[in-house]
Structures are given as C-alpha cells and as structure tokens.
C-alpha cells in the first residue's frame, strides 16, 4: 500500500513504518543484463550450469542488483505530492546478509527514521530491508537517503 503525503507534511513522516511492497521475482535475464551493464560476469551470476555446483547451488543475483531494486520498490511505498525534484542522495550502512538465488521472490520493507530540512527541501533517512520470500535472513539492509524539493 502506498503512503501518499504532500510536500508540506513531509516532516511528519519521521517514525513512519511504510510497510512492505509486493514481491518481484529475480530472473536470470535481469542478472545477465546487470552483468553486462557492470562488466561483472563472475560465473556465480551468469553460468547457471556451473553455479549448480557452486557454493549457493544455483546462480545468484549481484548484491548491487538486489540493492538497485529499491528504486522500483519506492514507487510502491511512498508518493510525495507537490515536489519538483526527487533525488537519491545516498546510502548508509549497506549490507548483503544473504544471497538472492535466481528465481527467488524479493520485497522491500521500509521505515522513515528521520526527516531533516536541507537547503531548499527535506532529506529523509529510511531503513530499508529487502526480504527474500521464505528466507531467514534479508538480502539487503541499508539506510537510504532521499531528498525532496518543492
């Protein structure tokens, strides 16, 4: 469910649990495209046959591919009306506790932990966890920093 808020109420978001997104399935095509984009063709990602005998028993998504899914997940969690510009400002404390096997379903859970005024706008800090369906550990744990300008 999407939280919708207006720019002038953005400061009120501190402490808000935004819930979680729907699941997305990570495909081998996504992994291969990411490998091409980043020039990271390590066999544990792009060679499904060899990966079957590797440490994870199947090909796995790049950690940064999984992290990049935070971008489309955001559209499911938060909509801020009355802004002219939205900027991904950065990340803090990024970790990849568990690999995402190709074919796994992942979703994101997020909580706004802080909202601060910055020159011309607001910055929000959001604790984001990308969860693996049926997994005991998350795939990604990170604090995202986002800026909104009116």
Image (cartoon, rainbow, N blue to C red):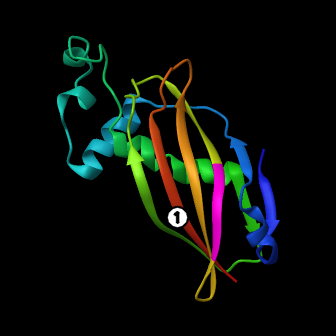
Measuring 39% from the left and 28% from the top, which residue is drawn there?
Answer: 98
Q: Which residues are magenta?
A: 111-116
Q: Left or right: 114 with respect to 4?
A: left
State the residue lying farthest toward the bottom: 120
Where is residue 59 shown, x and y percent of the image?
30, 23
**For this rendering, which residue is in front, 13 or 132?**
13
Q: Left or right: 108 with respect to 56?
A: right
Magenta: main secondary structure: strand
Measuring 66% from the left and 50% from the top, which residue is drawn there?
Answer: 111
Where is residue 75 shown, x and y percent of the image?
66, 54
Q: Is 76 rendered above or below residue 7?
A: above
**For this rendering, which residue is in front, 125 or 7?**
125
Queried whether the magenta region covers residue 30, the answer comes back as no
Task: Decide: few, some or many residues near mark 1? Use Cα within 10 Å; few <14, some 14-19, many ≥20.
Answer: some
Q: Left or right: 21 with respect to 12?
A: left
Where is residue 12 shown, x and y percent of the image?
79, 67
Q: How many marks?
A: 1
Q: Which quadrant of the structure image shows residue 3?
A: bottom right
Q: Which quadrant of the structure image shows residue 43?
A: top left
Q: Is 57 rendered above or below residue 29?
A: above
Where is residue 104 shown, x and y percent of the image?
48, 23
Measuring 40% from the left and 38% from the top, which residue is drawn there?
Answer: 30
Q: Is 83 rendered above or below residue 75?
A: below
Location of the C terminus by quadrant is bottom right
Location of the N terminus by quadrant is top right
Q: Left or right: 49 with respect to 11?
A: left
Q: Secondary structure at mark 1?
A: strand
Q: Label 1: which residue?
A: 145
Measuring 74% from the left and 71% from the top, which residue is drawn there?
Answer: 11
């Amino acid at each position: 469910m999407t939280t919708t808020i207006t720019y002038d109420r953005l400061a009120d978001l501190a402490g808000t649990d935004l819930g979680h997104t729907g699941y997305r399935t990570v495909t081998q095509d996504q992994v291969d495209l990411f490998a091409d984009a980043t020039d990271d063709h390590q066999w544990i990602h792009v060679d499904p046959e060899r990966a079957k005998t590797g440490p994870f028993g199947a090909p796995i998504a790049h950690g940064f591919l999984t992290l990049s899914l935070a971008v489309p997940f955001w559209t499911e969690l938060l909509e801020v009306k009355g802004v002219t510009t939205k900027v991904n400002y950065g990340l803090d404390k990024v970790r990849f506790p568990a690999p995402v096997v190709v074919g796994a379903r992942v979703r994101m859970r997020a909580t706004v932990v802080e909202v601060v005024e910055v020159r011309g706008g607001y910055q929000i800090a959001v604790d984001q966890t990308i969860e693996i369906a049926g997994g005991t550990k998350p795939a990604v744990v990170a604090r995202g920093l986002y800026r909104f300008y009116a």
